[in-house]
Image: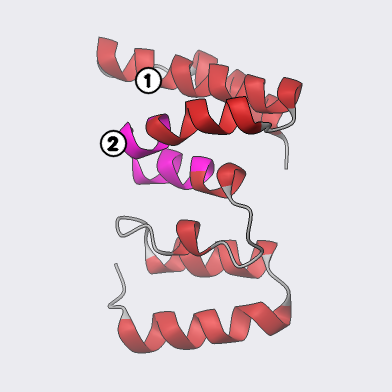
């Protein structure tokens, strides 16, 4: 995981609106704080409201991933606006085989693909 690359991309990404630009810079700043502070309690308590307020489901998922304390990452996998394909890719990338199987069974049985 290359958080520094993500920060650089967020800072140079061409925003479609001024508000989107502010959001992207705010997310970049929050990610930089994660690197510098190691995701401590102050960082967590500051970023949780940000995660809940961002409109983009993928940015919300990034924060859910970084704020997560459980190895199952349900907070990422239940993000309703992410495609099923992306959820499966995330599970295969970050979870071990033992944890992927039940998630795949649940997602494929109870969620309609996007």
Residue 80, above or below 17: below
- Residue at horizontal 55%, vertical 23%? 30
Query: Based on the displayed image, in which of its 4 quarters is residue 42 positioned?
Result: top right
Q: How is the image coloured?
A: secondary structure
- Magenta segment boundaries in residue numbering: 50-63
Tell me: 37 left or right of 10: right
Of the numbered discs 1 and 2, the one sitting upstream in the chain is: 1
Residue 56 is a magenta residue: yes
The residue labelled by disc 1 is 23
1 displayed left or right of 102: right
Residue 68 shows in this picture = yes
Between 16 and 87, the one nearer to me in the picture: 87
- Pointer 1 and pointer 2: residues touching (CB < 8 Å)? yes
Indicate whether 82 appears above or below 1.
below
Write the residue at 43% across / 21% down.
Answer: 24
Sort mark 2 into few (<14), some (14-19) or many (20+) by Cα contacts within 10 Å. Answer: few
Residue 7 place in picture, x, y as percent: 61, 22
Q: Which residue is mark 2?
A: 55
Q: Position of residue 113 (x, y in %)?
A: 31, 74
Q: Residues within 10 Å of mark 1 (few under 14, many from 20)?
A: many
Q: Is residue 74 magenta?
A: no
Spot occupied by residue 14 in the image (x, y as percentages of width and height): 40, 16
Q: In which image quadrant can residue 107 be found?
A: bottom left
Q: Write the residue at 36% across / 46% down.
A: 57
Q: Position of residue 39 (x, y in %)?
A: 68, 33
Q: Secondary structure at mark 1?
A: helix
Main SS, magenta region, reads helix
71 horizontally vs 111: left or right: right
The residue shown at (36%, 13%) is 22
Can I make out residue 15 in this image? Answer: no
Where's the C terminus, which quadrant?
A: bottom left
């Amino acid at each position: 995981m290359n958080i520094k690359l993500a920060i650089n991309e967020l800072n140079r990404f061409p925003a479609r609106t001024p508000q989107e630009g502010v959001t992207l810079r705010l997310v970049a700043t929050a990610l930089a704080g994660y690197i510098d502070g190691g995701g401590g309690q102050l960082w967590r308590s500051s970023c949780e409201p940000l995660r809940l307020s961002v409109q983009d489901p993928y940015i919300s998922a990034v924060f859910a991933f970084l704020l997560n304390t459980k190895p199952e990452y349900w907070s990422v996998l239940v993000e309703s606006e992410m495609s099923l394909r992306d959820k499966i890719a995330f599970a295969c990338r970050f979870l071990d085989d033992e944890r992927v199987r039940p998630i795949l069974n649940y997602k494929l049985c109870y969620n309609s693909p996007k």
